Amino acid sequence: MTPILQLIDRLLNSSTPSDALDSIREIIESIQQHADKKEKEQDGDEEEKEPPVLSLVSTLIESHDFMISLCSILSENQFRSSSSSSRALTLEGGSSVICELLLTILAVLVPPSSSSKEDVRSLPISNTLSSNNNQTVQLSATQRKHRIQILKQLLKPPSEGRSLIHSLLDVISPSAEDEDTTGSDRDHPPFASYHPLYARISAIQVLDQFVVILPSFVHAQILSAPNGTHRILSLVSSTGGQSMDESDEEIQVIRNQAILLCTTLVRTSSACARLFIFSEMYERILLGIAVPELHRYATQKNIHQVDPTSLILVCDCLQLCLEMTFKDSMGCKVFLESKTLLHALCAMLDLRLGIHYRFPRRQQQQGQTSSSSSMKHSHLYYARMIYSIDSFLI
C-alpha cells in the first residue's frame, strides 16, 4: 500500500476528530512535498514529463470513499468513519482544512503560467508550486488536457451524496434546509452559521477558480444545486455606511469577495448575466454598495482618514456592472430605463470628490515628493473608477 493510500485509510478509519484532521493535514503536506521535490528536479531539465504529484492527486480523486468524506466534511464539518459507522464525527474547522487541501490541489493542477491572459486569470490562489524566484511554468497542450481531465474527475457529481461544487455552496451560503436547522441563532445571518470566515472566503476563491477553468461544467452544477445562483446573490447585500459589530464586518468581507465571484460568473456565462440583471443586481451593486461607499470616502474631513479601499470596492462594483452590460444587451435597456441608476452613475463623475479638490491647501503643503501612500492610492483608484464609468457610458 502506497503512503497516500495509507493516509486515506487512516482518515476513513479515524476514531477521533483530531485523528481525522491530522490525516487530512498529512495529505496536504504529502502533496506539497511531492510538488516541491518535482520543482527542484526540473531545474535545468526541459524534458516534458508529468510530475508524480499528479498521480498522487489522481489517487485521492479516484477514491470514492475519500471524496464522499471530503464533501461531507466540507459541507457539514462531519463525516462517518468506517470504524464508527453508528455515529458521525464532528470536525471543528473541518471545512477550513478541506479548503486548504483544495487550494493545494489547484496549485498542483494549475501552476503559474504566463502564456496567455486566460492563463493569468487561472493562476492558483495558493503559491504552493511557485518557486522562490517566481518562475512561471509553461504547460504543453497535452499537459493542460491531462490536468483538465483530473479537474473534471474532481468535480464530477458522485452517484450518491453531494458533489464538490454543491458542498462549496454549502460553505458559502447554506440551502434553505440548512437555514432551517442552523438559523436558530438570530444574532448571525444563516450563511455565517457554523463555517469560519477563513473557510467561507477560501470556498469562494476555490469556486471562482473552478469557474475560470471549467466555466460550462461549473455553471451547470451551480444551476443544479438548490437555489444555487440565488444563494450566491444573497451574499451581495448592502451594509455600507452602518455601524458594524464583528459579525457585520465579516459579512462585508464575504460580500466583497462574492462581488468578485459574481464578476467571474457573469464574464463566463451570458445566461448568468441575464439572471443577475433581472435579479436587480444593478440596484444591489450601485445603489446598495457603490454609492454608500463613495459617500463614505467623500465625507472624510481629514486627509489622513481617507480610506482608498472604499474606492477599490466601488471599482469592483462598476466592473461587475460592466461585465453584465457587455455580456447581455438587455443590461443596457434595463439600465437606461432607470433614472435612479443613471443619476447614481452620473454622480460618480463629480470630480469634486477627488483629493486635489477637497484638500487643496494640504496638497500644496505636502508637495509632490512627500505625498502619502494613501493619497497616491486614492488618485489611482479614483482614476480607475472614472475610467470604468467612461467605459460603461461608451
Image: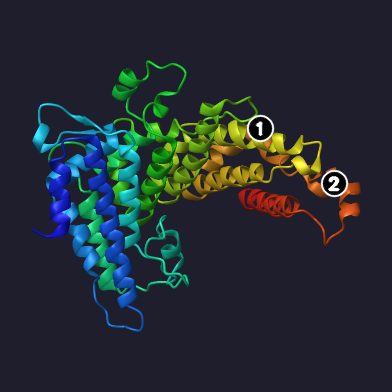
Q: Residue at x 71, y 41 (%)?
A: 348
**Colour pattern of the rendering:** rainbow
Q: Which residue is mark 1?
A: 292
Asked which secondary structure carries label 1, the reply is helix
Q: Residue at x 30, y 77 (%)?
A: 41
Q: Is residue 241 left or right of residue 41?
A: right
Q: Residue at x 33, y 55 (%)?
A: 104
**Which of the marked residues, 2 or 1, is nearer the chain's N terminus?**
1
Q: Is residue 1 left or right of residue 181?
A: left
The front one of 62 and 101 is 101
Cα distance in 3D space between marks 2 and 1: 20 Å
- Residue 226 picture location, percent across and down: 29, 31
Placement of 148 over or under 163, stated as above or below: below
Q: Which mark is residue 79?
A: none
Q: Which residue is mark 2?
A: 357
Q: Is residue 14 left or right of residue 95?
A: left
Asked which secondary structure carries label 2, the reply is helix
The front one of 274 and 247 is 247
Q: Amino acid at mark 1?
A: Pro
Q: Is residue 219 left or right of residue 72?
A: right
Residue 1 falls in image quadrant: bottom left
